[in-house]
Amino acid sequence: MITLHASALLRRDRDGESLPDHAVLVSGDRIEAVGPLAELSSAYPNARVRRWPGTLGPGLLHDGPLPPAPTPRERVHALLRTGVTAVLAEHLADPALRAAAERSDLLVLATAVAPTLRSAGRADLAVHGVDGACLVTVVAGRIAHRRA
């Protein structure tokens, strides 16, 4: 299914310019296009549209140890609640923690790479509210966290 994730503001990278009324077109686990919502809606009239409050941008890279929690799954979920979609491999030495990260489809990277929204890239997105809280985390095209 093709989905348009839209918000009032979009950033292609973490510190990039805020673009008003833009969207990300997602098909499966890939980004098909990034652009003005009106143009993408017109070009893909059958796409499901998800409108999010806040600023839509790339998922975050977590470059430190995972937060403490009773189980590996809860440690990974603590990251998803903040908009993290990628983690450095060096912080997943525990096999149970690595398995939990892989089950959640977190991107495991050997080295830090700045996340960006680009066509043909993996559909890892996050929406943050004006207070900085993560509202939605999309990992490989699927919603992995949604704030209640």
Image (cartoon, rainbow, N blue to C red):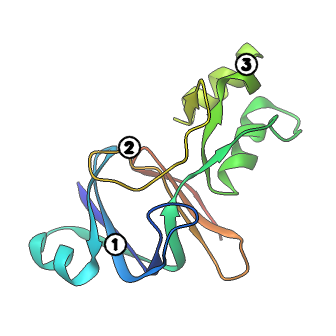
| Number of the label disc, if any, that sits on residue 37 | none
Residue drawn at x 12%, y 79% as measured from the top left: 42
How crowded pointer 3 is (Cα within 10 Å; few <14, some 14-19, many 20+) is rated as few
Q: Earlier in the sequence, mark 2 or mark 1?
A: 1
Residue under pointer 2: 122
The residue shown at (27%, 52%) is 119
x 50%, y 60%: residue:
13
Residue 34 left/right relative to 136: left
Q: Earlier in the sequence, mark 3 or mark 2?
A: 3
Q: Estimate the spatial distance between the alpha carbons at disc 1 and disc 3, rounded to whole Å.
A: 36 Å
Callout 1: few (<14), some (14-19), or many (20+) C-alpha neighbours within 10 Å? many
Structural crowding at the residue carrying mark 2, measured as other residues with C-alpha within 10 Å and reported as few (<14), some (14–19) or many (≥20): many
| The N terminus, quarter of image | bottom left
Residue topped by disc 3 = 96
For the residue marked with disc 2, what is the amino acid? Arg
Q: Nearer the viewer, residue 16 or 118?
A: 16
Q: CA distance from mark 2 to mark 1?
A: 15 Å
Residue at horizontal 70 percent and vertical 57 percent from the top = 82
Residue 15, relative to residue 82: is it above or below?
below
SS label for mark 1 = strand
Question: Residue 79: image x %, image y %?
Answer: 71, 47
Q: Which mark is residue 23?
A: 1
User: Quadrant where the C terminus lies?
Assistant: bottom right
Horizontally, is 57 left or right of 111 in the view?
Answer: left
Q: Are marks 3 and 2 in contact (CB under 8 Å)?
A: no
Dot 1 or dot 3, earlier in sequence: 1
Instruction: Tell me the amino acid under the disc marked 1.
Output: Ala
> Foreground mark, 3 or 2?
2
Q: Nearer the viewer, residue 56 or 118?
A: 118
